[in-house]
Amino acid sequence: MTWLRKRYRLIATAKIAVAIGLMWFLIHGGKLNTAAVAGAAQRWPLLLLGIFLLYLQMAVGAWRWNILLNVQAVRIPLVKAFSLTMIGTLFNMIIPGAVGGDVIKGYYVSRCTVERKAHVVTTVLVDRVLGLVGMMAVATFAGLMDWSLVSSNRTFTSLFFFVAASFVGLCLGLLISFSASGRWAIALERLTHRLPGSAIIKRLIESLVEYRSRPYTVLQAVVLSFVAQALCCVSFYLSALALGYNDLPVRAYLLVVPLGLVTTALPVAPGGIGVGQAAFYGLFRLLPDATGGMGANACTVFQCLVVLMSLSGFVFYFTYKNEAAADVFSVPPPVADLPLEG
């Protein structure tokens, strides 16, 4: 255990060092203007609206996760789903990488639904994939709506086709997974029964198959993912407006923001700090009437909004710890066999 803690601390320290190094390089290289970023506070109404949209994004994400849990017969109130989503966002911020919050959400729910732990894990995984599908869908839709912007740069065109192909591939993967027959599930179980944790794999497969009978629920979750990612893009757009960047239309942000946010999900630096600035610097250089500095500055303001919103998760975290878990979660009890009347 001691070795694992030392290893984690070493990795966390390295990621923090990467973030600091990237920020130092961007600032001293003239790619990030800290004075301009600080000046965005003068347009605080735009920033408040941006934070509100981020909270709204969290609410939509909690709704999506809640309906996925309902398919697995795990019932929690939507308010509690939102609280756990905020707690997950908090841990995403304070734990290097972007999956710490998913682990926390799954842990809190699964410890109160012992018999359906694998089903809870499945919802967390499916929720993460659907979030990525929504992000790719926004970028693909925006690119098709403004093809002249996509075709204005060869690199941009290549990025768009990569994202569009990834979106189609993810949709096909979900379709195959959710529509697979019982024979496919049995065959997959046989292939994995000798692997470590085969019992868990079996329960995961069984819970995944349950979505096959609820296609409209999955479609609803995809639509909610699209809405959530679009709200995030608009919040980024408001961050740019707070900096005085009025030259780019909102549809341009719908295209480039999902591309840049994908890089911040990589477990390289806490909260994507430094990595996001570098990614948006490169992406904005591809846009007509934009500069790389605009992307780096807007990303920094946006990340400040995300940090403020995420840190409010402490309120939900401490509130949750003071609640009785038995009053929060409920799983339908098995129906007992009734004696036949003769």
Image: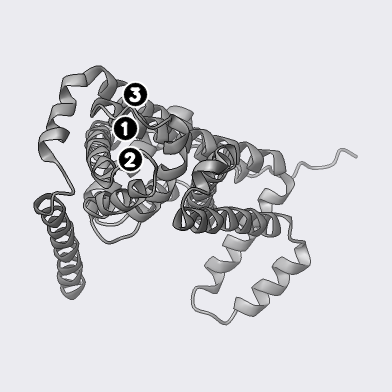
In the rendered structure, which disc, 2 or 3, sits on the residue that comes first in sequence? 3
Question: Residue pushed farthest right?
Answer: 342
Q: Which mark is residue 323?
A: 1
Q: Secondary structure at mark 2?
A: loop
Crowdedness near tag 3: few (<14), some (14–19) or many (≥20) residues, C-alpha within 10 Å:
some
Residue 333 located left or right of residue 107: right
Instruction: Pick whichever, 243 or 75, lies toward us.
Output: 243
Residue 331 seen from this side: no
Q: Secondary structure at mark 1?
A: loop
Q: Which residue lies at the image location 49% right of the left edge and 42% below the top edge?
A: 149
Q: Which mark is residue 108?
A: none
Type of residue at label 3? Phe
Could you say where residue 60 lies in the image, as x and y percent from the top left? 48, 32
Colour setting: one colour
Q: Which residue is mark 2?
A: 290
In the rendered structure, which disc, 1 or 3, sits on the residue that comes first in sequence? 3
Q: Secondary structure at mark 3?
A: helix
Residue 53 located left or right of residue 165: left
The mark closer to the camera, 2 or 3, is 2
Residue 108 located left or right of residue 308: right
In three-dimensional space, the C-alpha distance between marks 2 and 3, rounded to whole angstroms, equals: 26 Å
Q: Which residue is mark 3?
A: 52
> Which quarter of the figure is the C terminus placed in?
top right
Type of residue at label 2? Ala
In three-dimensional space, the C-alpha distance between marks 2 and 1, rounded to whole angstroms, equals: 50 Å
